[in-house]
Image (cartoon, rainbow, N blue to C red):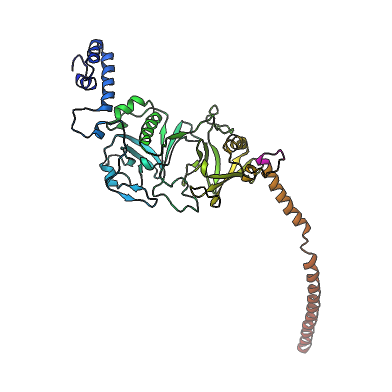
Amino acid sequence: MLGGLDTRKLGVVFKSRPDILKGIEKAADDPSRVQLFNNIADFVYEQIGDPSSSEPALKRRRVDIEPSASKNGTVAANGAATASSADVASESILLEVKDISVSVPQRKKFDLCFTAQHLYARLPNTTAPVAGMIYAWKDVEYAFYIPVPEKTQVQHNYIIFPPDSYLSSLSKNSTPSETEPLVFTVSAGAPKPGAIGGPNASAASAVSDSYSTLFHWAINKCLQAGSKGVHVVATDPAKFHSLVKQSHRPKEKAVHVKAFRGSKDGFLFFLENGILWGFKKPLMFIPLDRIAAISYTSVLQRTFNMVVEIFTNEEGDVGATEEVEFAMIDQEDYGGINEKYVAKHGLQDRREANGEAEDDGLTELERAAKLEQQLQDEEDEEEEDYDPGSEADSDGSGASSEDDDDDDDAEGEEMDEEGDGDGDEA
């Protein structure tokens, strides 16, 4: 190493350009420049590797991740090939990020490992992937980057949906997922010292000033190698945000809406490619092309319910749908949901879409409230018209009169018998 320069790596990187190598040696006249040139050499070397090495090209090209078929494995219920834990463990790890908080499918801290074919979780100081936490890049259906609601400190969740997992909680779903979604949380800060490992650690550190930029870079790069064109989708307050103020971060627009699904409370996220419900199990993502219609019910003074009619198969068979209801949504969020999302994406009730809805100048929410009020009024009128005693009372009164006469006769006989008895005793 001449003057602190890593001449070996520089020689490999600029083997075909001796003029550049001489220029670097001449310009390396202070420690900061020496460090800069060495960092450049390290970064480029990580990408091209050592051409003189006898290692396979895949191992030398540490940053360019290319998919390859697994030699061994099994076939899942949905027909996708799944590699065994042993096969995945034998794959070369390109990048690992340690001590990451996972909430689904297990709530625990894991090390996340990236290979050319898979993302998997493993426990610290172990080498085997955790069962049920192996995700093949080629099979990933959707990936999301979502802020964690109601946290004082900024945190984000990454969500990875494997095949058939995003609508697995539908009762009519006939192809349940073999693997649950992966949900892990990262802070807004930079990765901790020593948190990044593997052959691509230097390259990852060079492009990552935070956990978010690190995982965006790594996940998107691996997904690009797949054939589905999947990429990480993030919330965008310019496209949708709630009008309900956040007390803990009042200056920041919330991109979530509080709601209930059954008895479980959670959050709705209205994204560019569909509606996400989380973060408690079971998570659900409803792609736009699987939404048949959206309508509103149970309209109260402060809340309303949203009903999403979902095609239960990918072919979009109109006859095969199922409704999912999200309840107790704040009235303040109606305008944003209906105008900026439902109407924008053409998800209105089919009657509107077909021009069958009455042109009464009312919003969908107002129309739903009017309908519910009409139903309530009809029930009230039926209760007022119904006289529970008109027929029953007349029959009942006659029966009661006869019963009273019989009772009087019986009482008289008893008194006579008692009187006779007393006279005898006397």
Does the magenta portion include 364? Answer: yes
* Between 28 and 11, the one nearer to me in the picture: 11
Which quadrant of the rendered structure holds the C terminus?
Answer: bottom right
As drawn, 348 above or below 42: below
As drawn, 136 above or below 240: below
Q: Percent position (x, y) of residue 417?
A: 77, 85
Q: Which residues are magenta?
A: 360-366
* Between 102 and 117, the one nearer to me in the picture: 117
Query: Does residue 144 appear left or right of residue 306 in this picture?
Result: left
Does the magenta portion include 44? Answer: no
Q: Percent position (x, y) of residue 154?
A: 46, 30
Q: Percent position (x, y) of residue 176?
A: 43, 51
Quarter residue 404 falls in: bottom right
Which quadrant of the rendered structure holds the N terminus?
Answer: top left
* Between 122 and 360, the one nearer to me in the picture: 360
Q: At 48% from the left edge and 31% from the top edge, which residue is drawn?
A: 152
Query: Does residue 224 appear left or right of residue 170 in this picture?
Result: left
Query: Does residue 149 appear left or right of residue 340 in this picture?
Result: left
As drawn, 60 above or below 108: above
- Confirm whether residue 29 shows in the render: no
Q: Percent position (x, y) of residue 316?
A: 52, 47
Tally of numbered tags? 0
Quarter residue 253 falls in: top right
Quarter residue 304 falls in: top right
Query: Does residue 67 appear left or right of residue 386 in this picture?
Result: left
As drawn, 151 above or below 5: below
